[in-house]
């Protein structure tokens, strides 16, 4: 199915719905979530600021995937196929929800999203995520995802070689790549 065109106004409206959903999920899962163990914080400390690592929460949701919100079903009907149950993990600002225990590479990926949220703010993150999806029509091609995948791959290929995720994300912002 080919995606229908979205007006600027619709994109703004859907971005606001997405942002509200993200905020709600973050608040709902925050209480049950836990921080990374010190050993893992240590391993990631050559890539992320310690403050970020010590303030990001993780929650393994064992009773099934998060239900898709109504607006997502509307988007599906218009040819935008995106469902929360297909993801291994979802980052809601500073709370990472997953359906299984995450490998370090996936944790790393989600932490990149935390940096993106911090730098862009929730509204911009939601807007750029949706716009990326609508422009290219595939989850993997959303620039915010491409950035996170590129960095988690770099980490996976050489976990001993430090780089600053914050700087990398900033480079993408400066280059207007999101
Ligand atoms: Zn991602």
Image (tube, rainbow, N blue to C red):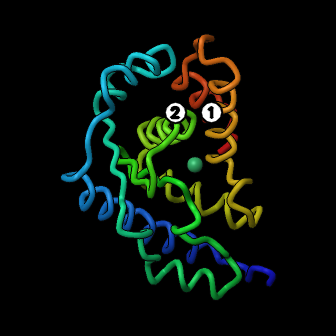
From the image, tell me which residue sits under label 2: 104
Of the two numbered discs 2 and 1 in the rendering, the one whose residue sits closer to the viewer: 2
Viewport quadrant of the C terminus: top right
How many discs appear? 2
Q: Residues within 10 Å of mark 2 (few under 14, many from 20)?
A: some
In the image, which disc is placed on residue 152?
1
Give the image location of residue 98, x and y in percent: 44, 54
Task: Report the residue at 38% width, 61% height from top.
Answer: 22
Is disc 2 in contact with disc 1, using a CB cutoff of under 8 Å? no
On the rendered structure, is 164 left or right of 91?
right
Q: Earlier in the sequence, mark 2 or mark 1?
A: 2
Cβ of mark 2 under 8 A from ligand 1: no
**Residue that protrudes farthest toward the right in the picture:** 2
Compared across the picture, whether 68 is left or right of 60 comes to right
Q: Is residue 137 above or below residue 92?
A: below
| Res. 43 mark | none
Q: Is residue 3 above or below residue 111?
A: below
Q: Is residue 122 left or right of residue 124?
A: left
Outermost residue, left side = 31
Q: Residue at x 52, y 78 (%)?
A: 72
Q: Position of residue 92 (x, y in %)?
A: 39, 53
* Residue at 40%, 24% in the rendered image: 40
Question: From the viewer's perspective, is residue 78 above or below residue 158?
Answer: below
Kindly report the distance in space between the C-alpha atoms of the residues bearing marks 2 and 1.
9 Å
Q: Quadrant of residue 61?
A: bottom left
* Label 1 element class: helix
Quarter of the image for residue 2 reads bottom right
Residue at 77% x, 62% y is: 136
Q: Position of residue 17 (x, y in %)?
A: 42, 72
User: For numbered disc 2, what is the local secondary structure?
Assistant: helix
In the visual, does 24 lie left or right of 124?
left
């Amino acid at each position: 199915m080919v995606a229908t065109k979205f007006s600027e106004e619709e994109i703004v409206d859907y971005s606001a719905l997405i942002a509200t959903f993200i905020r709600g999920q973050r608040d709902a899962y925050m209480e049950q979530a836990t921080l990374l163990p010190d050993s893992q914080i240590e391993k990631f400390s050559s890539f992320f600021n310690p403050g970020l690592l010590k303030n990001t929460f993780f929650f393994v949701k064992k009773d099934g995937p998060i239900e898709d919100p109504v607006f997502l079903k509307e988007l599906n009907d218009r040819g935008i196929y995106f469902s929360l149950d297909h993801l291994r993990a979802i980052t809601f600002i500073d709370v990472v929800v997953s359906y299984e225990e995450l490998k370090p590479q996936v944790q790393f990926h989600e932490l990149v999203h935390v940096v993106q949220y911090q730098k862009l703010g929730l509204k911009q993150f939601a807007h750029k995520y949706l716009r990326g999806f609508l422009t290219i029509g595939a989850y993997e091609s959303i620039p915010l995802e491409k950035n996170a995948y590129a960095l988690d791959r770099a980490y996976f290929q050489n976990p001993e070689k430090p780089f600053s995720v914050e700087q990398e994300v900033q480079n993408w912002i400066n280059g207007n790549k999101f």
